[in-house]
Image (tube, rainbow, N blue to C red):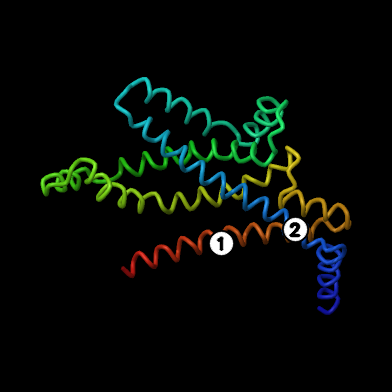
Amino acid sequence: MTGFLDNIIDSIHKNLLVGDAYLIVLKGLWITISISVLSLFFGTILGGILCSLRMSKIKLLKVAAHFVIAVLRGSPVLLILMILYYVVFADSRIDAVYIAVTAFALNSGAHIAELMRSSLEAVDKKQLEAARMLGFSKTGAFFAITIPQAGKIAKPVYQSVIVNLIQWTSVVGYVTITDLTRTVNNIGARTGDPFFALFFGVLIYLGLSYAVFGLFSIGRKRGESR
């Protein structure tokens, strides 16, 4: 048992303390969080736009939105990232991080659009009719009845979208971004102890995922207490 603990302590020292490697890990973690947050923000906005077009009464807009969503949802996010980096923005001076945000926003936006559409369509239409009979305008009924209920329906899946997005960002090393995954991989290669470095990276990703679950759990408890 003592030998096992000594090995762990030695691995921690070698992988995280020597050369202040933990600071490099923190920098990689910051890159991962930044890409995830920005991608989610812009992806949610894009999702809302695509959802509104997908539910439009104008057939051309509806078909176009359906096609865009299908392409983005069906394409591996890594390939979208590489096309943007090595083809679309190959000759530009745009930072790779912004290109990554664009790729993940496009991909997550398509998933969020379908999530929004299915959630809105799941709301009982009779409640809208009742609200209109009580004097609500069509817009007022939508914001007072449809949006809150659709939000409750979408919340668990939206939570999974966020966690998946964080995990997807682990591929940004393919376009020279030194994120959390690439950082721990580099440390493991340098120290010759890849298992500890990569396992430590897995623990951080798990921590991020459970932090998301925790935030949603807090939000749910506050909603129930009101």
Q: To which quarter of the image does residue 106 belong?
A: top right
Query: Pointer 1: residues within 10 angstroms few (<14), some, or many (20+)?
Result: few
For image coordinates 57% across by 46% down, the residue present is: 38
Tell me which label, 2 or 1, sits earlier in the chain: 2
Mark 2 to mark 1: distance in Å?
19 Å
Position in image of residue 24 (x %, y %): 78, 57
Q: Nearer the viewer, residue 113 or 102?
A: 102
Asked if residue 63 lies left or right of residue 165, the reply is: left
Tell me: residue 226, above or below residue 54: below
Q: Position of residue 152 (x, y in %)?
A: 35, 54
Which disc is residue 210 wearing?
1
Indicate the position of residue 190 as horizontal and vertical percent values: 88, 54
> Disc 2 designates what residue?
25
Circle 2: residue type:
Val
Mark 2 against mark 1, which lies toward the viewer?
Answer: 2
What's the residue at 57%, 31% (across, down)?
Answer: 75
